[in-house]
Amino acid sequence: MITEKVTIGSNYPLDGLITIPDTGKSPYPAVVLVQGSGAHDMDEKIKGIRPFKDIAEGLAKFGVASIRYNKRSLTYGKQMVKTLGNSLTVKEEVIEDAVLAAELLRQDSRINPDKTFIVGHSLGGMLAPRIDAEGGNFSGLIILAGSPRRLEDIMKEQQAEYLNSSKGFVKWIAGKQIKKISENLAKISTMSDEEAKNTRFAGGTTLYYLKEMGAKSPAEYLESSTKPILVMHGDKDLQVLTDKDFEGYKKILENHPDVTFTLYPNLNHCFMPSVYSEISKLMKEYKLERHVEEYVIADMAQWVNAHA
């Protein structure tokens, strides 16, 4: 494979990599990789794992190119908070750069501009239909461990589960913090934009970040999409759930003309074998140096090539 450095955007230039297969014949189908929540690098590094590096290099073996890049909040987090203040949303943090990456990918003569796809993981999966609708113009969507629900609903659930799996003094401290956060999350739907902008949530982020994102849920974007969709989920995922999220996608997309659902036994949120079954031990699990299962990447590549 060939891996080359690229720069995404000009107002907020981001370091990235484009990976081109050395098998098959160009122009190749290609994917834009969009990370989950948090200030991730282009490999979506979490402790000892690098899911996007695994996926990019794995897809290249099957003749699928890719582009990945550092998230804007990683490179310009403080500047974004200073410039945008309380108005920061996923549009500035995620969507604009994903659209720019897709445009850059299509300008490469080795890429088939009519066969570009989005691979969104976690929050990136939730936003994939919106990114497509707001300028991504992809040939299809791959949703990895996403959710059709609103982010605040998932967060409330995760916090409750974390509290249940905690013990002693840690549980007492967590309980006080989670109670305050949950009270704020519960108010989002009744808040005005100005109230949400003036209610701090985490770091430099306000509740407006969640309110703006939730104004139109992932489910609503999906219901109006006719693009081919691949939904992939690990049944040991503790961050999004099989019964509420994977099955939720099935219900929403039951009449969709071209959708594939794949559920993987014993895989976690990053499509690696599950080690612990407690959300409070997620970071401990991610410290273990492991890789995205090869058969997951093979399934992804097979789906892309079938739609190319």
Image (cartoon, grey):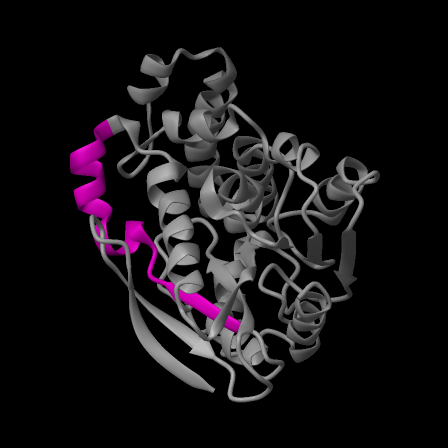
* Residue 274 in picture, x, y percent from top left: 66, 67
* Residue 296 in picture, x, y percent from top left: 68, 71
* Residue 23 in picture, x, y percent from top left: 57, 88
- The part of the image, by quadrant, that contains residue 84 is top left
User: Quick check: 282 left or right of 271?
Assistant: left
- The part of the image, by quadrant, that contains residue 67 is bottom left
* Residue 11 in picture, x, y percent from top left: 20, 48
Residue 287 showing in the rendered view: no
Q: Is residue 228 above or below residue 81?
A: below
Residue 31 showing in the rendered view: yes
Which one is nearer the viewer's eye here, 296 or 221? 221
Taken as a whole, is the magenta stretch helix, strand or loop?
helix
Q: Is residue 284 above or below residue 156?
A: below
The stretch in magenta equals 65-85
Which one is nearer the viewer's eye here, 70 or 46? 70
Which quarter of the rendered picture does the C terminus lie within? bottom right
Seen at 53% across and 47% down, the residue is 137
**Residue projecting furthest to the right:** 255
Seen at 22% across and 51% down, the residue is 12
Seen at 57% across and 74% down, the residue is 64
Residue 71 on the magenta span = yes
Which one is nearer the viewer's eye here, 77 or 6? 6
**Number of dots carrying numbers:** 0
Q: Is residue 269 above or below residue 252?
A: below
- The part of the image, by quadrant, that contains residue 203 is top left
Seen at 66% across and 56% down, the residue is 237
User: Quick check: 144 left or right of 69?
Assistant: right
Residue 1 on the magenta span = no
